[in-house]
């Protein structure tokens, strides 16, 4: 089985939480056709429908609900890992602040 790329999983998660492709595309700053194509590709890869149409929106299928729970956990763990990395392994330095398009010194005090 081929792996699922995180970008497709993020698109799926956004469509699921937004309840439709149009709102998800707007939130992700993508065109609607791109979001639709990525969802179809994901469904083909998994061999299961992830959504069903309901009115003007989409509702998760049972398989989609399961995948959404995995996706939410995966992204939550990724966020925690990034926070841990920044807090523990990045050198502590003051934030750089610039009020123009060019910075004159390395760090603002």
Image (tube, helix red, strand yellow):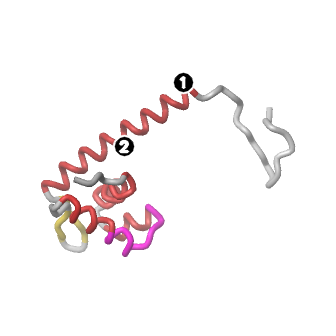
Q: Position of residue 86 (x, y in %)?
A: 55, 31
In the picture, measured across the screen, residue 37 lies left or right of residue 103, that is left
Secondary structure beneath dot 1 equals helix
Residue 25 inside the magenta-drawn segment: no
Q: Residue at x 24, y 74 (%)?
A: 56
Q: Position of residue 18 (x, y in %)?
A: 33, 60
| Residue at the left extreme, as displayed | 62
Name the N-terminal-most of marks 2 and 1: 2
**For mark 2, does the 10 Å Cα neighbourhood hold few (<14), some (14 to 19), or many (20 or more) residues?**
some
Which residues, given as a range, are shown in magenta? Answer: 28-37
In the picture, measured across the screen, residue 26 lies left or right of residue 89, that is left
Q: Residue at x 23, y 61 (%)?
A: 45
Secondary structure beneath dot 2 equals helix
Answer with the quarter of the image where residue 63 lies.
bottom left
Q: How many marks?
A: 2
| Residue at the front extreme, as displayed | 1
Give the dominant element type of the magenta stretch: helix, strand or loop. helix
**Dot label at residue 88:** 1
**For mark 1, does the 10 Å Cα neighbourhood hold few (<14), some (14 to 19), or many (20 or more) residues?**
few
Q: Which residue is mark 2?
A: 75
């Amino acid at each position: 089985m081929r792996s699922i790329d995180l970008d497709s999983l993020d698109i799926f998660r956004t469509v699921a939480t937004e309840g439709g492709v149009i709102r998800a595309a707007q939130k992700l700053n993508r065109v609607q056709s791109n979001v639709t194509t990525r969802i179809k590709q994901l469904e083909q890869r998994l061999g299961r429908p992830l959504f069903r149409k309901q009115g003007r929106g989409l509702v998760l299928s049972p398989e989609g609900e399961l995948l959404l729970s995995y996706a939410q956990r995966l992204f939550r763990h990724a966020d925690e890992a990034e926070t841990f990395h920044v807090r523990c392994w990045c050198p502590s330095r003051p934030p750089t602040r610039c009020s123009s398009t060019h910075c004159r010194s390395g760090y603002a005090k």
